[in-house]
């Protein structure tokens, strides 16, 4: 039977996957090594695995195939063989809203508790409505791109000509179905940047001025730097990261975007970098800090399943340590922009409190960006202003 074939593929990949790599990277490698799997097999295996992980730890006493059928019912409005085989009585409700589907599952499986989907009792940042947040894990986030306002109509025309559903969020932001093959439908990669809606919103906190010197201290592949540059092209920019492969990706993105005026350094920000930065003073510092990523688990639901609570404390130590090192290079009256893609209070408001209590930083504003209401990631951003020299020696 076809359903048995799909079940076997799902179980084999699930057994092989340990949560070390992001799921999309593991699947890429797995499919490359198992070329006998056709495109349909790969598509269904991918759907089932992502559905399965979106259930988190809810209904953990049921077997994996029962849990998969429930998860796939909650996540999709199209039927699958798994749903038809294990939950045929729910087929007629496949097009119902997520709220109605959750009620249907609760009625059939009395042990189902939606709060067990996100099973961490770590305190959430202020403003998160738990019901909406938990339900969002069953909804695939959109793919967002940032486009110059002068080019947005040309990009929309190309997308629509290729049958891609597109929603204009703003004069510079488009929302597309996740999985859209942009390289196949937009003929010039210089016309857009892939960047989540919430990540784009953090730019409202930056406030760069002409001829400023800014430092993107944990630059990764450069998304925030490109956003900063789009807000004020006439700035000088230093980008750094501990991962050289990320900086290689950054240079490719910068080249495509036409960003040429920047300095690049590979640095471990937990170390003393005075020999590298001894004469630097910045008009603004972006600190997109390493974090749990809990605000992005709608895109990476495998983390919802495999993440361990103790790691939050480790990230908090890292965030505080990095912030202590970078703030000494900030000019007086200039902003430190602290950001995470976490929904945990310990990584967000509590770190900001630590910074204001231990350094001469004054909180100007902060916000938990609730992306789950817009099929986007959730993020935290705070703008802190340097008052005097730091109260703590960052090299201690």
Image (cartoon, rainbow, N blue to C red):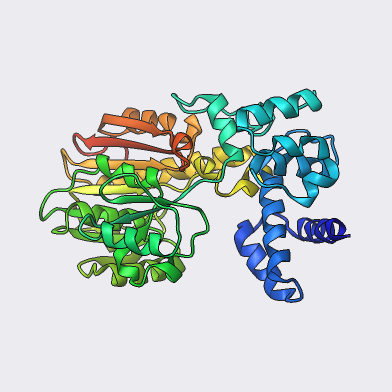
Toward which corner of the image does residue 310 lie, by quadrant? top right
Q: Is residue 65 left or right of residue 18?
A: right
The residue under the point 16% across, 38% down is 333
Q: Nearer the viewer, residue 292 or 362?
A: 292
The residue under the point 33% across, 61% down is 157
Toward which corner of the image does residue 44 lie, by quadrant? bottom right
Q: Nearer the viewer, residue 268 or 351?
A: 351
Image quadrant in which the N terminus is located? bottom right
Whole-percent x, y for residue 296 in the image: 51, 44
Do we see residue 54 in this rendering? yes
Residue farthest along the left direction in this orientation:
210
Image quadrant in which the C terminus is located? top left
In this picture, is 296 found above or below 15?
above
Whole-percent x, y for residue 347 in the image: 47, 36
Q: Is residue 122 left or right of residue 11?
A: left
Whole-percent x, y for residue 357 in the image: 34, 27
Q: Is residue 280 left or right of residue 136?
A: left
The residue under the point 49% across, 52% down is 177
The residue under the point 76% across, 60% down is 13
Do we see residue 275 in this rendering? no
Q: Nearer the viewer, residue 389 or 349?
A: 349
Whole-percent x, y for residue 234 in the image: 13, 59
């Amino acid at each position: 039977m076809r359903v048995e074939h799909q079940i076997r593929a799902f179980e084999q990949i699930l057994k092989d996957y340990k949560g070390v790599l992001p799921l999309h990277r593991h699947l890429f490698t797995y499919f490359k090594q198992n070329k006998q799997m056709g495109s349909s097999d790969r598509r269904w295996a991918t759907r089932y695995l992502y559905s399965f992980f979106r259930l988190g730890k809810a209904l953990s006493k049921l077997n994996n195939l029962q849990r998969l059928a429930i998860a796939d019912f909650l996540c999709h409005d199209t039927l699958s063989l798994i749903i038809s085989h294990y939950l045929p009585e729910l087929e007629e409700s496949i097009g119902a809203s997520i709220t109605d589907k959750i009620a249907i599952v609760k009625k059939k499986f009395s042990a189902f508790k939606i709060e067990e989907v996100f099973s961490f009792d770590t305190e959430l940042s202020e403003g998160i409505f738990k019901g909406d947040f938990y339900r969002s894990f069953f909804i695939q986030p959109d793919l967002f791109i940032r486009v110059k306002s002068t080019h947005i109509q040309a990009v929309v025309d190309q997308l629509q000509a290729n049958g891609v559903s597109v929603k204009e969020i703003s004069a510079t932001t488009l929302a597309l179905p996740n999985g859209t093959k942009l390289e196949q439908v937009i003929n010039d990669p210089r016309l857009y940047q892939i960047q989540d809606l919430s990540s784009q919103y953090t730019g409202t906190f930056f406030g760069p001025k002409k001829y400023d010197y800014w430092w993107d201290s944990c630059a990764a592949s450069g998304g925030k730097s490109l956003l900063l540059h789009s807000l004020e092209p006439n700035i000088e920019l230093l980008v750094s990261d501990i991962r050289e492969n990320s900086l290689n990706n950054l240079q490719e993105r910068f080249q495509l975007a036409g960003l040429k005026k920047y300095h690049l350094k590979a640095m471990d920000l937990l170390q003393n970098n005075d020999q590298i930065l001894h004469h630097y003073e910045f008009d603004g510092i972006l600190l997109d800090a390493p974090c749990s990523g809990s605000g992005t688990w709608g895109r990476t639901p495998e983390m919802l399943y495999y993440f361990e609570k103790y790691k939050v404390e480790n990230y908090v130590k890292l965030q505080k340590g990095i912030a202590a090192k970078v703030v000494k290079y900030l000019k007086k009256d200039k902003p430190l922009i602290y950001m995470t893609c976490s929904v945990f209070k310990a990584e967000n408001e509590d770190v900001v409190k630590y910074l204001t209590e231990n350094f001469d930083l004054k909180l100007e504003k902060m916000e938990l960006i609730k992306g789950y209401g817009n099929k986007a990631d959730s993020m935290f951003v705070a703008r802190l202003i340097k008052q005097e020299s730091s109260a703590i020696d960052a090299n201690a």
